[in-house]
Amino acid sequence: MNEALAISLQRQNNLWIGRFSAMASPCELLLDTPDETLAYQLVAIAEREAKRIEQKFSRYRDDNIIFKINNALGQSIEVDAETALLLDYADQCYQLSDGQFDITSGVLREVWRFDGSDCVPSSSEIKSVLSRVGWSKVNWQYSSLTMDKGMEIDLGGIGKEYAVDRVALLIRPYLQSGVLINFGGDLCALGPRLNGQPWEVAIEDSEKSKKSQAALVSLNSGSVATSGDTRRFLIKDGVRYGHILDPMTGWPVPDAPRSVTTVASTCMEAGMLATFAILRGAGAKDFLQQQEIEFLCL
């Protein structure tokens, strides 16, 4: 079993819990089955798929399609069907958010470094990078993408949720009982537990200095995603700067919630709604109420 070095599988509270790391996050599957062989098989499927997606779409690698796009120097790049699917989704998010969700905004990390320091960039530094931000400047027509030299795309805002949904799709045919997928706090429940009870998901209270529970979500099926900046921010002169940036201004979204958690049918949908809410700033709660979904806004 080649995956043995990357996967741990333990029996705890009548559950098999499989763990591995991917996409800079702890990943785990909770499997309500007595079958250890099946549990390991499903965790192995999840680990392979998560690592495949990470390798293909991470901006930290120099051997994948994202690197090829970001280093095309203004030339057109033909992409495969899966990449095109994610670019279409990103385009849809851009349109639905009136330009606030923008996968070209990752270059702002050149001036914003949320590293625990108090280094806030100047307006001129932000302005110099903003010229390279804007999905509207990108020529995307299935399956060809062209963008100006110096521009980049970053699928980090949708990659983890996509991985959860892909794993759910791949393991569903093998299921004999309920499974809970958890990739760094983005979750999907595939059926209830063997006793018919739902999975209980605790939502951390972002306002507390120590970990505490703000709410408990019960899931038989469906997904939960959280967006926020409770762990990545800067503080300078008493002002808090969250890491979620407005791509139109280059500055953190003003008056945004610390954390938004949403429940939806898929993880990508839940993640999209949570991120959209954060980008609405002070209007986050009103936006979520209009969606008629279950949510927690802190």
Image (cartoon, rainbow, N blue to C red):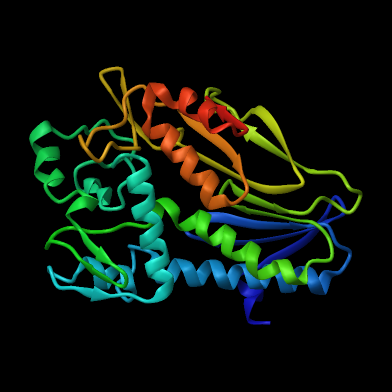
| Residue at screen point 33% across, 47% down | 94
Residue nearest the viewer, comparing 202 with 1: 202
Q: Is residue 168 above or below residue 130?
A: below
Foreground of the two, 123 or 137? 137
Q: Residue furthest bottom?
A: 1
Q: Nearer the viewer, residue 294 or 124?
A: 294
Quadrant in the rendering for residue 250: top left
Q: How many marks?
A: 0
In the picture, measured across the screen, residue 185 lies left or right of residue 133, that is: right
Above or below, comparing residue 239 to residue 194 in the picture: above
Q: Is residue 184 above or below residue 290?
A: below
Q: Is residue 200 left or right of residue 58?
A: right
At which x and y percent is residue 91? 34, 54
Residue at x 52%, y 52% (from the top left corner): 268
Residue 122 in the image, given as x and y percentages of width and height: 13, 32
| Residue occupying image coordinates x 48% and y 59% | 23
Q: Residue furthest right?
A: 195
Quadrant in which the N terminus is drawn: bottom right
Specify the farthest residue to the top.
Answer: 238
The one of 48 and 96 positioned closer to us in this rendering = 96
Residue 130, picture quadrant: top left
Q: Residue 165: x, y in percent?
A: 58, 59
Rendering coords of residue 166 (x, y %): 57, 65
